Image (tube, rainbow, N blue to C red):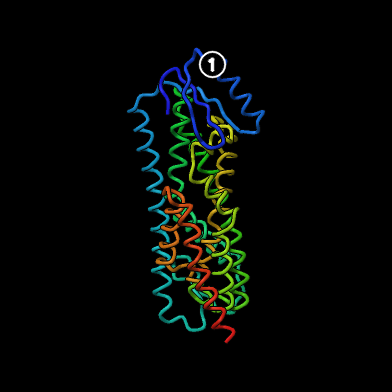
Amino acid sequence: MASEGNRVVATDDGESSLVGEDTRLLTARIAQRLWSAGLACQIVDLKPTPITLLRRDRIVVVLVLTLLTALAWSYLLWLSADMAMGGMDMGDFRMIPSGMGLMVLAHTPWQAMEFAFVFVMWTVMMVGMMTPSAVPMILMYARVGRQTEAQGTPFAPIAWFAAGYFLVWVAFALLATWVQWGLERSGLLDSWMASTSSVLAAFVFVVAGSYQWTRLKDVCLTQCQRPFAFLMRHGGFRPDASGSVMLGLRHGAYCVGCCWALTALLLVGGVMNLLWIGLLALLILLEKVTPFGRRIAPLAGTIPLVAGAWLLSMAIS
């Protein structure tokens, strides 16, 4: 990113240029003109940082995020196995995704305990699905933090940034829990929390497929694909907890804007269908971390659009 005594000027398109200390005044003038022209930019002083230190930070962050992902998927596997065993003789009962074999009468309204378990399930699911695609952003935040705060440690701000990011997905999980509760009360979900209505499934497919082609999807995906440009446009590294959390919240909002429609497809294939969860997580990962992700998005939207049209025609005929 930079060497000793250098500064970075990042513009709206994510391009950067290196200038020496002897041109500090010129750099400030260039930045001022960019701002006057309506182009957001950020000037960052990059400190000399040993490669070994950057590698250590990278290893620590990757290990922590890998462990978090593994724990989330282990919990989902545990829930799935528990529901599969209970599903053999459920009869007029429905399983509570608790991992403890809890069942209630199928027509019993949700109690606070069941709502809490479903909310935890959605939260852990979002962590397991979204963490891999968030790794590049968190690694970039760690690197910029290390190179701008070389005398300190970036790990606390990184943790706060990740907390802000996941807090947005926790809010999404709460909304998804309310939606699932409403659909289940209407008899539109089965014991595996998959759609029982062709019309509902067609509607979700069409909405999700159509959203993949929208400008909003493309804008949000672009923000997720360019970690360095995102940081420079939004103030760069924040050493304080509140600043890091707010930046994490902002990035999480873009991520939800990018992926909410794809996660809605869980209501069609089954909220606890691990194959369905895995395929959607893989698609999200390909969209956000590969250079051709913006081309994958509309192509991936074609499949649910076709499936939705077919289901709707079958429902009408």
Percent of width and height locating residue 257? 58, 53
Residue 80 found in image quarter: bottom left
Percent of width and height locating residue 316? 59, 84
Percent of width and height locating residue 262? 51, 61
10 Å crowding of disc 1: few (<14), some (14-19), many (20+): few
User: Which residue is drawn at the image coordinates 50% and 66% (left, top)?
Assistant: 302
- Amino acid on which disc 1 is placed: Arg
Q: Is residue 224 left or right of residue 55?
A: right
User: Which residue is drawn at the image coordinates 60% and 53% (left, top)?
Assistant: 216
Furthest residue toward top: 22
Q: How many numbered dots are placed on residues in this image?
A: 1
Q: Up-down: is 184 above or below 69? A: below
Percent of width and height locating residue 231? 53, 36
User: Which quadrant: the N terminus?
Assistant: top left
In the image shown, does 51 or 114 lie closer to the viewer?
A: 51
Whether residue 197 is visible, yes or no, is no
- Label 1: element kind: helix
Residue designated by label 1: 24
Q: Up-down: is 107 above or below 49? A: below
Q: Up-down: is 100 above or below 13? A: below
Whether residue 10 is visible, yes or no, is yes
Furthest residue toward left: 52
User: Which quadrant: the C terminus?
Assistant: bottom right
Q: Is residue 44 left or right of residue 286?
A: right
